Image (tube, coloured by chain):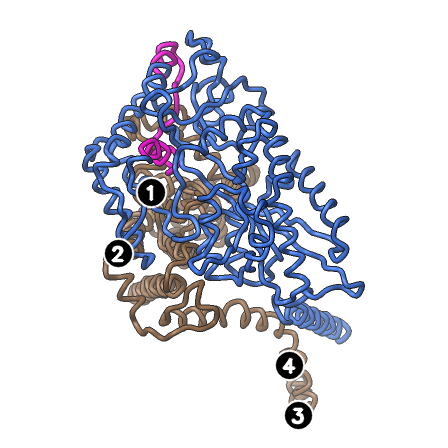
Amino acid sequence: MKKKEKQTQKKPRGSLKKEYLMNYLGLLPFFSLFLVFMLYPFVYGIAMSFTDWSVSSRGKVNFTGLANYKFILSGEGVSSERFLTSLKNLLIYVPVTLLIGMSIALMLALIINNLGRKGYGFFRGVFFTPYALPLFIGAGIWQWFMTPGTGRVSQLFAKIGIGVGVDWANTAIYAIFMVVLIDVWHATGFNFVILNAGTKDISPDLYDAAELDGATSWQKMRYITIPLLEPIIFMVVTYGFISALQVYDIPYILSSTTDANGIGGPGQVMLFPVMEMVRNVYLGSPSGLGRAAAEGVILMGIILLITLIQFRFRRKNV
Amino acid sequence: MKHRNNGKRMIALILTLVMVCTALSGCGKGDDSGKKASSDGGYDLVFWTYSDMVLNDQGKLMDQWVKEFVEENDDVNSITVVAKDDADLLTSLMAGVGLPDMFCASARDAMSFQRAIDLLDLTPIYEGDKEWADGFYKGARAAATNDEGKNFAVPFMSFVPLIFRNTDVLEKAGIDWKNEPLNTWDDFYAQCEKVKAAGIDATHSWSTGHFTCPAGILACDAPSLTIGHENGKTTVKPEQCVRAFETMLTMEKYSNGTTYGSQAATEAFKTGALGFLCAGPWTEPDYQQAGVHYDIQLIPAYEKDGWTGGCQGQDWMYGVDSKDAGRNDAIRRWLKKMGSFETQKAFTKVIGRSTLRQDVMNDPEALTLDVAKVLSRGLNAGMPQMEFGHSSVFWVSAIADVAPRVTSGELTPQQGAEEFIKAVNALYTEAGE
C-alpha cells in the first residue's frame, strides 16, 4: 500500500491530466446523449410551456407567461376539463395500483423465498413472464379477458357480483380498475424479482437465532425480514410511484382510436395526464404544444413533490 | 493490467468517435437535404401513404402507377412509396422534419397540415385542366380549396361505414337475406329480433367505444341538420339530434356488449356468433380471407328510399413545397395522375373502394364489386365527418362521450342531444374557431 501511494505521489502532473482526459473521453458518449436527448429537451420543454407554441408557430413563438398554466388549471375549456379529469383518475389509480401491486409482489417474494432452488427458479420464471411480454400483446390479451359477457375474467368477476353486465373498458371507475389489473399483472414479476433478491441478502443466521428464541414465522417476518428489506421496499415503492404517475401505454392501447378526442375512452374514463399531453400535441389547436409542455411541467412537479415527501418521511423514520 | 486499461480506453475512444460521427451525420439542412435533382437531372421522389395501399392488390396497383409515371416523366428517376399507419403519418408529418415530397392522409387533419407544413399550391393543375378538375365531387373540391381560393390537395378516396351481415347467421334465423335488404331502421330492428330469437347475438353496441356508429346514426338526419359554425358555436340544434339518440337507445337492446372495431366483435362476426357488424370497407379483405359468407348494407334510412346514414371519411393527396421549381412540377404531375379518372377508376374497379371523383363513382364500369356499388350509393347520402379543409374541429366525435350516457339511462335522448351540442360548442371554443 505504501509503495503504491509513493508511486501515485510520484506521478507528474502532466501524466495525471492525460489520464483524466482519457477518462473524460470515455464518459463523453454518455454525456453527449444525456445532453442531447434528456437535458436539452427538458429545458426546452419548460421554456416552451411559457409560450404560445403550436404546430403553426414555425419557430416563431411568443412569451405568454403563466397563461398556459392558468388555462389548464382553470377548469374551463375542453383541454382543462380533460386534464383535471386525468388528475382525478390518477388519484384513484396510483394508490390502488401501488397497494395491490406491492402487496402481491412482497407476499410472493416472502413465500417463494422459502422454496428450494428449483421451485424458486420455476416460479421466478412464471412471475417474470408477463413483464417480458410486449405490453401491446398483454393489453390485447386482457381486452379479450375483459370482454363483456364472453371474457373469462369478466365472467369470473360477474360470478362474484362485480361488474355484472358492465363494459369495463368504457365505464367510469371500472376502466381504471381494468388498467390497475393489467398493470399489476405486468409489473408484479419485476417487483417480485427485486424484492426476492433483497431477501436473499438477509443472513440466515438471524432467522436461526430468532428460531432459537422461539419466534414465530410472523414475528420473524415482522422483526427481521421487513426491517432489513426496507431499503429495497423503499426503492421499489419510489420507482413504482414515478412509473404509476406517468401511466400511458396500457390505457392508450385500450382506448386507442384515430380520433384525438377519443383518447382516454368515452367520458375520459381511462384518461391520464400523459395521454392528455399527447392529445394536445396531435390536436393542432392554438397554443396546443405550449399547453402540452405546461401539463408536462405540472406532472413533473407532482412527481417531484411525492418523491421528496417519500424521502423526507423515510429520513424521519430511519 | 496496463494493456487492459489501454484496451478499455481505446474502446471508449472508438465509441466516442462513432457517437460523434452519428450525431454529425444527422445534421445538415434538414428538409433540403436530398431535395435537389441528382447528377443526371432526375428527381427521386418520396411518397408516404397508408400501409394498406402498399399491400395485396392495392400494392400492385401502386407499383403499376409508379412504374407508369417514371416511364412517362423523364425528369423523375424513382418514387419511393413509404407505408405508414394513421398515427405514424400524423406524427411524422407534424414533426415537420424529413418530410416526403407528397403524401396521402386523412382530410380530417388538413387544417393541421396547412398550419404545420408548407403545402404545395396545386392550383396550376386545377386551372390547367378543367375536365380533370370538374370530375371531382363539388363538395370535395371545395373542401380542398383554402379561403384564399388556392387548391392544396387532391381528393382521392372516401368511405362510409358499412353493415356487414353474416349470411349464415341470417339463414339460421330464417331471414331471406337476398330479398330482405336493410332499407329502413324498422327492417334492421326486425332482423335483429329474429337473430336474437335464434339464440345468436344480433350486433355489437352502437353507442360505446367509438364515434362511428352513433355518428353514423346521426347522419341519417343529415338533411335536417344545420351543419356549420358561427361565432364559435355550432349551428346544429339539439332538437335535430334527438331521433338519433332514440335510435341508439333502441339498438342497445340488441347489443352483445362488444364495441365497434373491437377484436371481440370482429371475431364473433367471423365465427358466426354475431349477425351484424358495422365496419369500414377496408376490413372486407379480412372477412374474405376468413371465409365468412356475408353481404354489405348501408346504415339504413328511417323511411324507404330515404337518406342513409354513415359519416363520410375522406383521404386526400398533398404535396410538400420543396422550393425547387422542377421538383414541384414533378410533384404536381404525380398528384394529377393520382387524381385522374383512369387512376381512380382502376382503384374503384379493382379494390372496390370509393373515390372522390363523381365521374368515376357514376360510371357503371367502375362499380364491378359489390362493395363499390354500395359505397357509391352511400356517398350520395350520409354526411361528411367534419368541415374538411375549413375547420380543425372534429365535431361529430363529441357524440362518443354522450351516446353511452344515453344508452346507460343516465340521460334521456333529449338531454343527450343538449349535452352533445354543449360538447360540440366546447370543441369549437377550444379550437378558437
Q: Is residue A123 visible?
A: no
Question: Which numbered disc flags the more N-terminal residue, 3 or 1?
Answer: 3
Give the answer, above or below, for where B94 lies relative to A18: above
**Residue A132 spot, x, y in % from top left:** 54, 44
**B106 on left or right of B343:** left
Mark 1 to mark 4 CA distance (whole Å): 61 Å
Mark 3 to mark 2 CA distance (whole Å): 75 Å
Report the mark closest to the observer, 3 or 4. Answer: 3
The answer to whether mark 1 and mark 4 are in CB contact below 8 A is no
**Residue A262 spot, x, y in % from top left:** 38, 45
- Local packing at callout 2 (Cα closer than 10 Å; few below 14, some 14-19, many 20+) is few
The magenta segment is B192-221
Mark 3 to mark 4 CA distance (whole Å): 21 Å
Chain colored blue: B
Report the mark closest to the observer, 2 or 4. Answer: 2
Q: Colour of chain A?
A: brown
